[in-house]
Amino acid sequence: MSAAFFEVFPDVCLALDQKGRILDYKAPPLSALYRMPSEWGGKRIQDFLPLQVGAAFERTLEQVFNAQTAEYLEYSLLGADGKTYYEARVIPSSDDQVIVFIRDISERQQREADLRHNAFHDALTGLPNRNLFTDRLEMSLRRFRRFPKLFFAVFFLDLDFFKQVNDRYGHDMGDQLLKAIAEILKSCVRANDTVARLGGDEFTILLDSITSIAEVNNVAERIQEKVSTPLMLSGESIQCGISMGVVLSAFRYRQAADLVKDADTALYQAKQRGRGQYAIFMPPE
């Protein structure tokens, strides 16, 4: 394989035989992908890789030689600076040789991870958004149908006086308040529960695997106590409150949206009693 061919590509390039032995190579001068080229001669690429990654390379080489078609392999290596992701393109060049182009794709993997995260999380608070909350609620609903003793509850919450905070102090203060409330809500539930922000000052909580209504009341009272305590934000003491509606799991529910709707109805009932109240939804007779 000619040097001119290698120079066309900025990636690490290798020529391998059917056993994975390195016949030729080219690497950028400061490449951190593998050891220095002087160590490669006559060795197999598997010798420089963890066992599972090396086995994946062997399977890919076998596929390429058998089918004489290009294959792609993605893998990761753990180093001192954390995990690095790579893509290897394995291309047949003859009956007994392949060319492998190896590229660091860590930045691409991070961008894709960020896109996946943003699709299911609120940008301001970092909490799950409506999509992720609905997905987890549907899962709890399916589990409840199979195991009726695994009760759960859904809270629908919004802030008292949030508009007044925005009007008096501005939207930046309102955003600070929402982030502070998000942290308070997370501190009031367990790690396996879900706190989500639907938008504006509306939050939801999925209280999973509960055993009694007492747990629901305890969480509601804990939230009210913590939220009613004045918060110091940017040197200002912000007095807030929260109203809540709660719905309990029941066999009549078939979709997550129905539970959220009834929790919202309970929230409206709570507000009719005044600020800082909570109500548990009771279906009509």
Image (spheres, grey):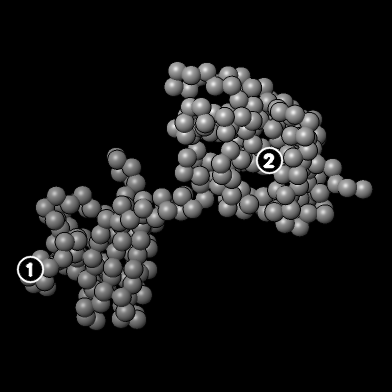
Side of 153 relative to 39 (left or right): right
Identify the mark at residue 43; answer none if there is no mark: none
Q: Identity of the amino acid at label 1?
A: Ala
275 or 178: nearer the viewer: 275
Work out whether 261 lies above or below 190: below
Alpha-carbon distance for marks 1 and 2? 66 Å
Q: Position of residue 13 (x, y in %)?
A: 19, 64
The quadrant holding residue 79 is top left
Q: Which residue is mark 1?
A: 3
Dot 1 or dot 2: first in sequence order is: 1
Q: Position of residue 91 (x, y in %)?
A: 26, 74
The quadrant holding residue 7 is bottom left
SS at circle 1: helix
Q: Position of residue 93 (x, y in %)?
A: 21, 78
Total labels drawn: 2
Side of 79 relative to 158 (left or right): left
Q: Which residue is mark 2?
A: 156
SS at circle 2: strand
235 or 74: nearer the viewer: 235
Work out which residue is located at the far right of the displayed protein and give it: 285
The quadrant holding residue 3 is bottom left
Q: Position of residue 186 (x, y in %)?
A: 58, 33
Q: Identity of the amino acid at label 2?
A: Phe
Work out whether 224 lies above or below 23: above
